[in-house]
Image (cartoon, rainbow, N blue to C red):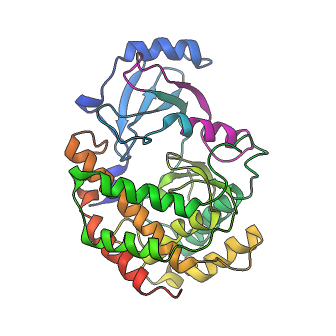
């Protein structure tokens, strides 16, 4: 699958994801300052979980994120949490779209939703940043590194997010959550490598470090909007905060590092590429830059966390497989995504077996 072609731009809204546009216009007239209709609504091609729409009016463009309709797993698709964390971070000057309002009244469009600004710029779907010069690539990697380090620098209590999650036991809780979700989604079936990996992770769980920060949960190049010009290596906005919580910033950063451990055929990987020729720092140099920015001397439990975050990503794919079986997958390319489940689970299991613990 060509990820850039598959995910870039918009399409007509899928039949089962359509809603009463007039009702939305009425809500926006009351809650979005300066809004005036009429609206033209289209659906972004990308996005596997919460359906995301482009809203064009004569005066401005907006983005709507909503909970999908139909049968959902408990605790998933929390658009209210997305809106809250983005509002809190935006107040600090962090790069997120401005949130205009959250609507929890299902009577408006059928499910809860929020509306935010449409941020113009580039979304890069491949971690190799195709089409850029080596110097531009290096600058974009440095911008990503600086952005996640800045996120992890905030004191959650100081920015009003002290109750956004539990302050300890992050990896243990996440492992329990995703193992339970994986094992409980009977419509998606079981994967032998996932079963073995869950058992290994439970057996080798490291001690909790008690370092709690706001974590994004899915920090990848394709969840960012970069400045419109490739000569400006600036992250204009970080998107898709559905998995955000309070947690271990090292685990959050290690998830971001997965691009170094995965080949191009599994999500968007760098493994096997000539990084110096591309102008991309190697994994150790990228880690060192993050550590300098966050005042660390190393990344503790890196090998364990690589296996853990791969398991979590595979569990997310397993959830997409379940939504596909139930008929409420958001993306038209869900089936291709699910095709990466077993290869990713096998890769994660191999990382676990090679871990130096």
Residue plotted at (46% across, 15% down): 25
**Residue at the farthest front position:** 203
Look at the picture and state if 148 lies above or below 77. Answer: below
Q: Is residue 96 magenta?
A: yes
Residue 219 can be seen in this image? no
Image quadrant holding the N terminus, namely bottom left
Q: Position of residue 159 (x, y in %)?
A: 75, 43
Q: Position of residue 36 (x, y in %)?
A: 53, 14
Q: Is residue 355 magenta?
A: no
Residue plotted at (21% across, 40% down): 327
Q: Is residue 30 left or right of residue 211?
A: left
Q: Nearer the viewer, residue 357 or 345?
A: 357
Q: Where are the magenta residues, as a range?
A: 82-111
Image quadrant holding the C terminus, namely bottom right
**In terms of image quadrants, where is residue 99?**
top right
Residue plotted at (53% across, 63% down): 172
Residue plotted at (32% across, 31% down): 69
Q: Nearer the viewer, residue 38 or 181?
A: 181
């Amino acid at each position: 699958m060509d990820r850039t072609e598959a995910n870039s731009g918009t399409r007509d809204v899928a039949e089962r994801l359509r809603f009463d546009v007039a009702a939305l216009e009425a809500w926006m007239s009351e809650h979005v300052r300066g809004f005036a209709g009429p609206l033209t609504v289209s659906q972004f091609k990308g996005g596997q979980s919460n359906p995301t729409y482009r809203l064009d009016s004569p005066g401005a463009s907006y983005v709507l994120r909503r909970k999908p309709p139909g049968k959902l797993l408990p605790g998933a698709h929390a658009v209210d949490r997305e809106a809250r964390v983005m509002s809190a971070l935006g107040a600090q000057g962090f790069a997120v779209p401005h949130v205009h309002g959250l609507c929890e009244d299902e009577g408006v469009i059928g499910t809860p939703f929020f509306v935010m600004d449409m941020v113009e710029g580039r979304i890069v779907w491949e971690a190799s940043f195709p089409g850029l010069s080596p110097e531009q690539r290096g600058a974009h990697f440095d911008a990503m590194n600086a952005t996640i380090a800045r996120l992890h620098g905030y004191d959650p209590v100081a920015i009003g997010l002290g109750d956004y999650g539990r302050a300890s036991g992050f990896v243990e809780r996440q492992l329990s959550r995703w193992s339970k979700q994986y094992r409980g989604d009977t419509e998606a079936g079981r994967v032998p490598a996932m079963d073995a990996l869950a058992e290994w992770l439970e057996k080798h769980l490291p001690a909790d470090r008690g370092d709690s920060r706001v974590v994004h949960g899915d920090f990848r190049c394709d969840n960012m909007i970069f400045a419109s010009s490739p000569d400006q290596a600036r992250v204009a906005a970080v998107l898709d905060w559905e998995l955000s919580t309070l947690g271990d910033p090292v685990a959050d950063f290690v998830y971001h590092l997965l691009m170094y451990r995965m080949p191009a055929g599994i999500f968007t990987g760098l493994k096997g590429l000539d990084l110096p020729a591309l102008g991309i720092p190697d994994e150790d140099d990228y880690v060192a830059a993050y550590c300098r920015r966050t005042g660390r001397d190393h990344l503790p439990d890196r090998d364990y966390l690589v296996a853990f975050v791969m398991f979590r990503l595979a569990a997310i794919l397993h959830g997409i497989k379940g939504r596909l079986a139930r008929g409420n997958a958001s993306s038209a390319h869900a089936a291709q995504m699910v095709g990466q489940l077993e290869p990713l689970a096998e890769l994660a299991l191999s990382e676990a077996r090679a871990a130096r613990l």
